[in-house]
Image (spheres, rainbow, N blue to C red):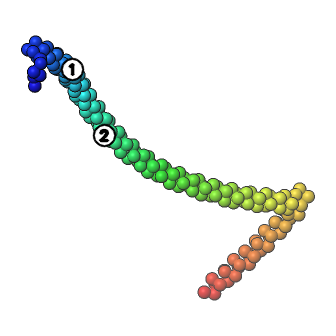
Amino acid sequence: MRHPRQGPFQDVCHIFSQKLALDGDVTDSISVHDALLEELANLRTEAYQLKATHRDKKESCRVLQFQCRESEQESARQLQLNRQSEETLEQYRCQIQELKLKHRKLRMKFENQLNQLIEQHKNLLTIFTPERLPSEIESAQNSKCQLLATEILKVAQLNILEEEV
């Protein structure tokens, strides 16, 4: 592609300028290549770090899932214990109510007995007053005499029956 008017010097100048342009392109390409190599190294480092982070996160996730399952199991166990405790507490409440009712019935029975005893005591006080005591003693002696007379009569009847036999 040489022009007929151009001479070898111009050809050399032209080649030299093309060489300079190519050298600039090569330098640019080398710079781009070096930058790309550096970027590739950075990306590889970042990828390695991301893989390590991913492994760590995966391990953390596994640990958290395990802890979550353990927490759920513990929660279920606590719920079961709470239900059992509530059932036991309800049984105790029922027993306490039964004991309160039993004590109330016993207290009422005692109060009734006490009231009866108080009434009997009042009746005895009205019967055995000092004014009535001599007549009560006389009545008791009369009853004693009648009982002795009846006993003597019965002994006599027994003796008669024994003699007849």
**In the drawing, does residue 136 fall left or right of residue 161?**
right
Along the line of sight, the residue nearer the viewer: 38 or 120: 38
Residue that appears at 16% across and 16% down: 17
Q: Which residue is mark 2?
A: 62
Comes first in the chain, label 2 or label 1:
1
Task: Specify the quadrant that holds the C terminus.
Answer: bottom right
Q: Which residue is mark 1?
A: 28
Along the line of sight, the residue nearer the viewer: 42 or 130: 42
Residue 99 x, y percent position in the rendering: 60, 55
Residue that appears at 83% across and 59% down: 122
Residue that appears at 11% across and 22% down: 3
Question: How far is mark 2 from mark 1, CA to CA?
Answer: 49 Å
Residue that appears at 70% across and 82% down: 157
Which amino acid is tagged 2? Arg
Residue extending furthest toward the top? 9
Task: Specify the quadrant that holds the N terminus.
Answer: top left
Which amino acid is tagged 1? Asp
**In the drawing, does residue 82 fall left or right of residue 120?**
left
Please tell me whether residue 52 is drawn above or below residue 159 in the rendered image: above
Q: Quadrant of residue 8?
A: top left
Residue 106 appears in the rendering: no
**In the drawing, does residue 21 fall left or right of residue 159?**
left
Q: Nearer the viewer, mark 2 or mark 1?
A: 1
Along the line of sight, the residue nearer the viewer: 68 or 157: 68
Residue 84 x, y percent position in the rendering: 46, 52
Q: Residues within 10 Å of mark 1 (few under 14, many from 20)?
A: few
Residue 69 x, y percent position in the rendering: 35, 45
Q: Residues within 10 Å of mark 2 (few under 14, many from 20)?
A: few
Instruction: Say the numbered circle drawn on residue 12.
Output: none
* Contact between labelled residues 1 and 2, with CB atoms less than 8 Å apart: no
